[in-house]
Amino acid sequence: MSRRPRILVINPNSNEAVTEGLRQAVKPLTYAEGPEIVCETLAEGPFGIETQEHVESVAIPLRRRVEANNEADAFVIACYSDPGLHVAREGTSRPVFGIAESGVLTALARAERFGVIAIKSRSIPRHIRYLRQMGLMDRLAGERALEMSVAESASGEGTLGRMIEVGRQLKELDGAGAIVMGCAGMARHRKPLEEALGIPVIDPTQAAVTMAIGTIAVG
């Protein structure tokens, strides 16, 4: 009997609530004939990745996690800053997907211009640098912040209402035709947010896992 392919989704922060949200987000992508999708927490990571220092601090631990794993056929780094993405890719011949890169590429297939919901304003310059490196600034309608922490975005009672408010600003004021949720901790709010806004809302972890499934399927 052939081994079932496996996709390892790594949450680079140490917040188990975020990891559980990732598990719920990828459930619709799990089916009997498809790859096994395993979500793990990087225990040595910060509780939330909210600064450039946090991003840099998890790069080598992520590389080591990827190098040490001989069972996964593909990896997903589940943080919207794509920490350690390139150094992890250097450590393996297997595909490594970053959720920011995957989420944005998916949004480009759904709309001419996209918007991003960030957790805090201070994360926006970091995201903008990344989009500039990708050469996609002309497709960005705007990015607006919730002004919440990663933990609050994952479990806060008022998170969805605030996301709807910010999403409407991106749609109506900035002209976004699709929205990318700019934090893995927002995963459980995708469907109700899309229903409220009436435009595509991209969960970047779902986008990255979908790309991993496709890559495995075609060998």
Image (cartoon, rainbow, N blue to C red):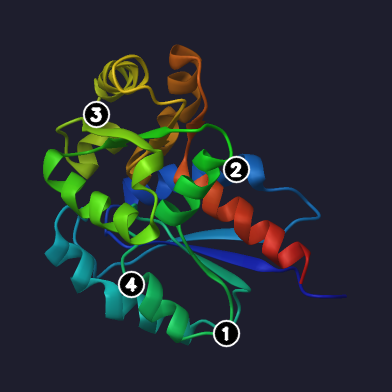
Residue 50 coordinates in the image, percent (x, y) = 17, 52
| Residue underneath mark 3 | 156
Tell me the kind of residue under disc 2: Lys
Give the structural element (helix, strand or loop) at label 1: loop
Residue lying furthest right in this view? 1
- Pointer 2 and pointer 4: residues touching (CB < 8 Å)? no
**Mark toward the start of the polypeptide (2 vs 1):** 2
Q: Relative to the observer, which residue lies in front, 15 or 180?
A: 180
Residue at 51% in and 49% down: 105
Tell me the kind of residue under disc 1: Ser
Disc 2 and disc 4: Cα gap in Å?
A: 25 Å
Mark nearest the camera among 2 and 1 is 1
**Mark toward the start of the polypeptide (2 vs 3):** 2
Residue at 29% in and 33% down: 142
Mark nearest the camera among 4 and 3 is 4
Residue 42 coordinates in the image, percent (x, y) = 33, 67
Give the structural element (helix, strand or loop) at label 3: loop
| Residue underneath mark 2 | 27
Disc 4 and disc 3: Cα gap in Å?
A: 28 Å
Disc number placed over residue 84 in the picture, else none:
4
| Residue underneath mark 1 | 93
Give the answer, above or below, for where 181 lies relative to 10: above
Disc 1 and disc 3: Cα gap in Å?
A: 39 Å
